[in-house]
Amino acid sequence: MSGSGSTFRAAAPDDAAALAALVNFAGEGLPLYLWGHMAEPGEDPWEIGRRRALRDAGSFSYRNATVADVGGTVAATLIGYRLPDVPEPVDWSEMPAMFVPLQQLEDLAPATWYVNVLATMPEFRGRGLGTRLLRLADEFAADTAARGLSLVVADANAAARRLYGRCGYREVAARPMVKEDWAGSGRDWLLLVKDRG
């Protein structure tokens, strides 16, 4: 799929560094914060992000990613997958507190195609890449017989919320953020859903 000088393709291992950067943009610095806590002494947190992108399994894997390629540069990405029909049991006491509200919201949207990450590099914003990637998400939802689509966004991310609203997503639930030392904006995580037309 292409147009306006961009091509949409499945991500490849060579895209790992760009995917790590885009995931951090989408997460407003939360991924880098977490990678910093995972890094060994002297290890670059970005290397953790790149390694996670290179995994064959897991939510943040290049295998779950579609990228917008503009002139050979990864300009944007959509990372997502179909959620199970019934949420998997979770031992909340074993989960880091920061993740609990995010997992709770995700569990409210079983059998949907989950938009885990939608992000565009700053220099490529305003070109409609996010809208076009969300159209691809609609196709992926149909291909996997998902009952709809879902995503979680920070309440303070007004630009993203406007985009999602224009594309048919509506807010259905919220949970307070657990920030620890992360300096992200906002107070709540919001679950947005879109029914399949």
Image (tube, rainbow, N blue to C red):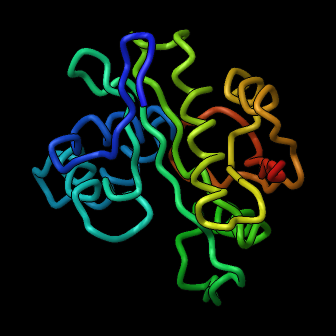
Q: Which residue is drawn at 60% across and 85% down?
A: 93
Q: Residue at x 73, y 48 (%)?
A: 189
Q: Residue 103 in the image: state x and y as whole percent.
A: 65, 68
Determine the image quadrant of residue 147.
bottom right
- Disc tally is 0
Q: Quadrant of the N terminus?
A: top left
Q: Is residue 20 above or below residue 175?
A: above
Q: Which of 121 and 135 is in front in this view?
A: 135
Q: Is residue 123 above or below residue 144?
A: above
Q: Which residue is drawn at 30% across and 45% down?
A: 11
Determine the image quadrant of residue 14.
top left
Q: Which of 9 and 47 is in front in this view?
A: 9
Q: Residue 47 in the image: state x and y as whole percent.
A: 17, 48
Q: Is residue 26 left or right of residue 73?
A: right
Q: In this view, does 111 lie above or below 3?
A: below
Q: As drawn, which residue projects farthest toward the left?
A: 42
Q: Nearer the viewer, residue 189 or 42?
A: 189
Determine the image quadrant of residue 56.
bottom left
Q: Residue at x 39, y 33 (%)?
A: 8
Q: Residue 87 in the image: state x and y as whole percent.
A: 68, 81
Q: Which of 29 and 85 is in front in this view?
A: 85
Q: Residue 43 in the image: state x and y as whole percent.
A: 12, 51
Q: In this view, does 54 lie to the left or right of 167?
A: left
Q: Is residue 185 above or below residue 159?
A: below
Q: In this view, does 167 lie to the left or right of 17?
A: right
